[in-house]
Amino acid sequence: MADDGREGSMITVPAGSSLTLRNPGAQDAVVVTLADVSAEFFTELPAIPVLSLDGPGVRRIGIVELVTSSGVTWAEAELRDGQLQIIGDAPTEVVQRRASARKPGTYPAAGTAQIDRPVGRRLVAVSGRVEDISTDGLLLRATGDDGVPSLPSGIERTLLHVTMPWGEMTAAVATVDQRADLLRGTYEWIDPVDAAALVRFCSPG
């Protein structure tokens, strides 16, 4: 099993949640959960009743995002006959690592992303909220001006201004993994004052 920091973590999937099952070789499947489900470990999660557009007998396997008390991670899941069953950890290259001190939460963020395109690089504005932050990096969930999830593809790095409890934190973030409206990255640069404040903020106790 991948090292996802599950020890002491609670996985919670509230009723009415919108989950996306992603598979590089097929179209993403969006489902809505019909019941509250929670467990301490992935292996203890029961099948989640969901509402989907698939007909009877259709089977999909892919990666789904889950929220734990330690932050956001991904797991491998199977969708069939209105049931979403977690069947294992995600491949290690897409799991949100938790080796460093970190804190989940909701921290407003805005900044500028550098995008690599065949015609050249360009800069675009991004905004949203940081949902998981550590002394090594962060997880950004982006939204557009109308509140709809929006994140352009091909982001290389992002200069972000994040509203933290001690004030505005400024950091340059190199993209590690990007999918839909989520971007996970590590710090290329962070203001030294913010770096010290972040260590205190993320430290246990």
Image: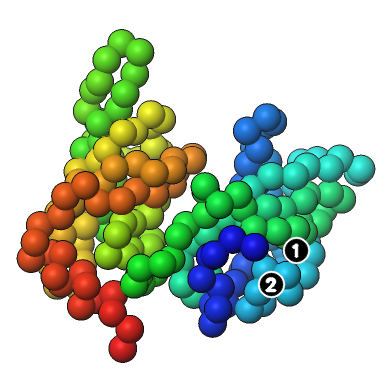
* Residue at x-position 84% and y-position 42%: 59
How crowded is the residue under tag 1: few (<14 C-alpha within 10 Å), some, or many (20+)?
many
- Quadrant in the picture for residue 201: bottom left
Name the residue carrying label 2. Answer: 37
* Marks 1 and 2 close (CB-CB < 8 Å): yes
Q: Judge from the rendering whether residue 33 lies leftward or rightward of residue 2; answer left or right.
A: right
Disc 1 is placed on an element classified as: strand
Q: Is residue 35 above or below residue 30?
A: below
Image vertical order of residue 82 relative to residue 6, above or below:
above
Q: x, y (%) of residue 199?
A: 22, 72
Question: In the depicted view, which residue is nearer to us: 22 or 82?
Answer: 22
Label located before the other in sequence (1 or 2): 2
Question: Which amino acid does the dot numbered 1 rest on?
Answer: Ile
| C-alpha distance separating marks 1 and 2 | 7 Å
Name the side, left or right, on which 174 lies relative to 163. right
What's under tag 2, amino acid-wise? Val
Vertical arrangement, residue 97 with respect to residue 21, above or below? below
Relative to 136, is 21 on the left or the right? right
Q: Nearer the viewer, residue 157 or 16?
A: 157
- Quadrant of the drawing holding the N terminus: bottom right
The residue lying at 51 percent from left, 71 percent from top is 5
Disc number for residue 48: 1
Considering only vertical position in the picture, is 66 above or below 147?
Answer: below
Q: Nearer the viewer, residue 61 or 143?
A: 61
The quadrant in which the C terminus is found is: bottom left
Q: Classify residue 8 by image quadrant.
A: bottom right
Mark carried by residue 21: none
